Amino acid sequence: MMVLDSSDVPERPSQRTFPYNVASLPKIRPVHRNPGGVDIDRDKHHCQINIECGNLQPGRKAWSEMFFLGVVAREPMSLSGWLFAGNKSQPYECTLSVSARVARRSISVKELVTLAEAADEDD
């Protein structure tokens, strides 16, 4: 499995490009994190997704920034996690279940260009 946040996803090629390679700049984490903020830490063997939820209250929804899971198989996966709260002495263990539809297909360069042009028209 592969985990990416929105800064890791390649930009769609365009005729106008930014002259600097933003991907090569180090990530700078803000001192104050807003609810929904996502940080992804990874090393050679592990990946950790940190989502700031702000003040958790019963029934309150906290929406996160977008992040992406790349899967190559249809089997359901479970991601283990912990909720940390200032008013709890121990973290609460939780599980996130992930299922995905995986489709593989081959396309020609012409079809790829057509898809890109259609996406540009949608913007």
Image (cartoon, rainbow, N blue to C red):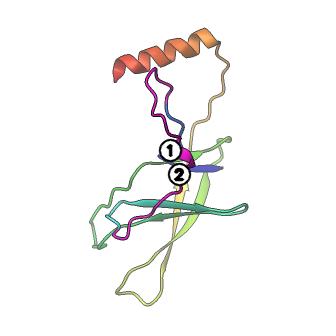
Residue 104 drawn at (x, y percent)? 66, 27
> At numbered mark 2, what does the secondary structure look like: helix, strand or loop?
loop
Q: Hey, what amino acid is under mark 1?
A: Val
Identify the residue at image location x=59%, y=59%. Answer: 78
For label 1, the residue is 22
> At numbered mark 1, what does the secondary structure look like: helix, strand or loop?
helix
Q: Is residue 111 magenta?
A: no
For label 2, the residue is 25
Residue 52 drawn at (x, y percent)? 39, 67
Identify the residue at image location x=46%, y=23%. Answer: 14
Q: Hey, what amino acid is under mark 2?
A: Leu
Residue 36 drawn at (x, y percent)? 35, 60
Identify the residue at image location x=42%, y=21%. Answer: 119
Task: Give 23 or 54, whichever is nearer the viewer.
Answer: 23
Task: Give 80 or 115, whichever is nearer the viewer.
Answer: 115
**Badge 1 vs badge 2, beta-carbon distance below 8 Å:** yes
Location of the C terminus (image quadrant): top left
Q: Which residues are magenta?
A: 12-32
Instruction: Give the Cα separation between the discs numbered 1 and 2.
Output: 5 Å
